[in-house]
Image (cartoon, grey):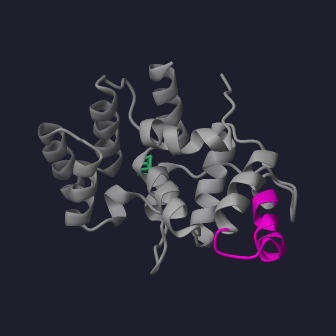
Amino acid sequence: QHHVITPDMIDHIATKSFPPCMRQLNDVLRTTHHLKHGGRLTYGLFLKAAGLSLEDALHFWRSHFTKNMELDKFERQYAYGVRYNYGKEGKRTDYTPYSCLKIIMMSIGPGDAHGCPFKHCDTPVLKQRLMAYGIPTQALSEIMDLVSKSHYQIACQRYWEATHNATLETGINHPNQFFEESQKYIS
Ligand code: SF4
């Protein structure tokens, strides 16, 4: 089942259906109007696989980035990268979105917003954020316990279950799988 998502839906579904890694990227993009290279790649490929068309992707990234830069600069420096993710530039490969394992193994530098929050966030920051997301106390302590044992993907599964108030039969191994399971459940 392949759904279509449009730019106007993104903030809403990010809150309801995106895994924490992608919700973080959307939040940083929305508040700073910018993402560094690793974030543009990770989030761009995720959105493509989630059903955002190239046209809409260009519109989406342009509308955020041009809050901080001239349209001309966006077109010269960033539009290429958006088209590249869709296999329209460079080697013209239809790039696949990153799995959890790949995201968990990515190195994170200063100012980067990509990565897996369960792995890359400092414990107090992660805990604070999950509380702000409305995770109930019991689930929160289970998640933090899993994180302390480096079971990031199981922590993410528990997060899915707490936010959907349901049980997930399979573990989480891909951000797009997290999203698909959520959309299946919600619709
Ligand atoms: Fe994203 Fe996977 Fe980490 Fe969940 S476990 S936040 S889907 S990278």
What secondary structure do most residues of the magenta stretch adopt?
helix
Q: Up-down: is 54 above or below 70? A: above
- The one of 89 and 128 positioned closer to us in this rendering: 128
Q: Residue 46 in the image: state x and y as whole percent.
A: 61, 48
Residue 142 at x, y percent in the picture: 16, 43
Residue 43 visible in this rendered orientation of the protein? yes
Vertical position of residue 84 compared to residue 1: above or below:
below
Question: With 113 as the anchor, is 38 left or right in this view?
Answer: right
Chain part drawn in magenta? 67-83
Query: How many marks can you see?
Result: 0
Residue visible at 26% across and 68% down in the picture: 122
Name the residue rendered at 46%, 62% in the picture.
115
**Does 69 appear in magenta?**
yes
Q: Which quarter of the figure has residue 84?
A: bottom right
Q: In this image, 36 relative to 79: left or right?
A: left
Whether residue 114 is visible: no
Query: Which quadrant holds residue 16?
Result: top left
- Quarter of the rendering occupied by the N terminus: top right
Q: Residue at x 47, y 72 (%)?
A: 107
| Image-based side of 66 in relation to 177, left or right | right
Query: Where residue 114 appears, x then y in whole percent?
Result: 49, 64
- Which percent across, then down, holds residue 155? 28, 45
Say whether residue 85 is left or right of residue 162.
right
Looking at the picture, does residue 68 appear above or below residue 57? below
Q: Residue furthest top?
A: 187
- Give the farthest residue toward the bottom: 110
Q: Which residue is painted at 69% across and 31% down in the image?
A: 4
Q: Is residue 150 magenta?
A: no
